[in-house]
Image (spheres, helix red, strand yellow):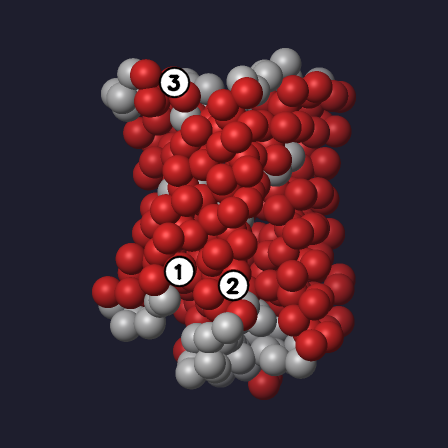
Amino acid sequence: MSARRNWLAYLALCAGILSLSMSSIFIRWADAPGPVTSFYRMGLAAVILTPFALRKTSFGAIDRRAWIFPVLGGIFTALDHGVWSTALSWTRVANATLMNNTAPIWVALFAWIVLREKLKPSFWVGLILAMTGATIVLGSDLLQHPTLSRGDGLALLSGIFYAGYFLITQRGREKFATLTYIWMICIVSALVLLGICLGSGFALVGYDTRTVLVFMATALISQVVGYFSVGYALGHLPASLVAPTMIVQPVLTALLAIPMVGESLQPSQWIGGLIVLAGIYLVNHSHSTASPTGEQVIPTD
């Protein structure tokens, strides 16, 4: 990977983390069921991306067998967002965000056991530190009362779907440019979420102006900017690096939640944030010093 692409990949990852950190706050601001907000997030994002994707995509050059990746990625994304947004109605934002971000555990274990990806000891130390720090920051309630509520259980399930998205996207980005791939993800996910909303009897219209504006914001900020940025990063960095780095997302969400939804952090949780950063550094360092033996995703744009 060239130095320029490496720098752009990390910059895109930072932009994606910042944009995605607003997701749970948008869901709380919207006066609508979680799956409805998620449907508009995906549907409006697909509309925004369509003219750009149609202009850039050369459909005839894409192997028909490759379309399975954005289809599966879209399904995993829809299940992740549908389940997680529902969990936010039944548990604290901190708990739901923490459970959803257990995705790096499932990604790393799958990469190690199934894909036979070689991971350095420093990677595992970094992963443990990052998850421990995230638990301190966002999981103080779980440490004191280690029982899973219905919302916590759903959020944990969403983390497994989130991991599926990472793993599918790592392969899918070998076949598609970032824009085309994210566009297809949005279309498939919107269709699946539409089915979930209709099947659950949720109203799709009749919401107030503020909620409509939130729908638009979550589509533009969390989806278009967030997923495009992370999708680009996954095209140049391995999923087992990107996923643990994304652990900073719930930490940033907690910081944003202080002024936006009135949730504050205790001193011990600030310490946990520093532990997260230390773990992320070790994860990134373990990959930056590794030899390129197939761990890197083949760049496509």
Mark number, residue 295: none
- The residue labelled by disc 3 is 141
Residue at the image point whose x is 41% and y is 32% from the top: 135
Q: Nearer the viewer, mark 3 or mark 2?
A: 2
Q: Pointer 1: residues within 10 angstroms few (<14), some, or many (20+)?
A: some
Q: CB under 8 Å between callouts 1 and 2?
A: yes
The amino acid sitting under disc 3 is Asp
In the shown orientation, is residue 192 left or right of residue 237? left
Is 111 situated above or below 224?
A: below
Residue at the image point whose x is 63% and y is 56% from the top: 13
3D distance between C-alphas at marks 1 and 2: 8 Å
Helix, strand or loop at label 3? It is helix
Is 158 situated above or below 182?
A: above
Is 107 situated above or below 298?
A: above
- The residue labelled by disc 1 is 122
**246 and 88: which one is in front?**
246
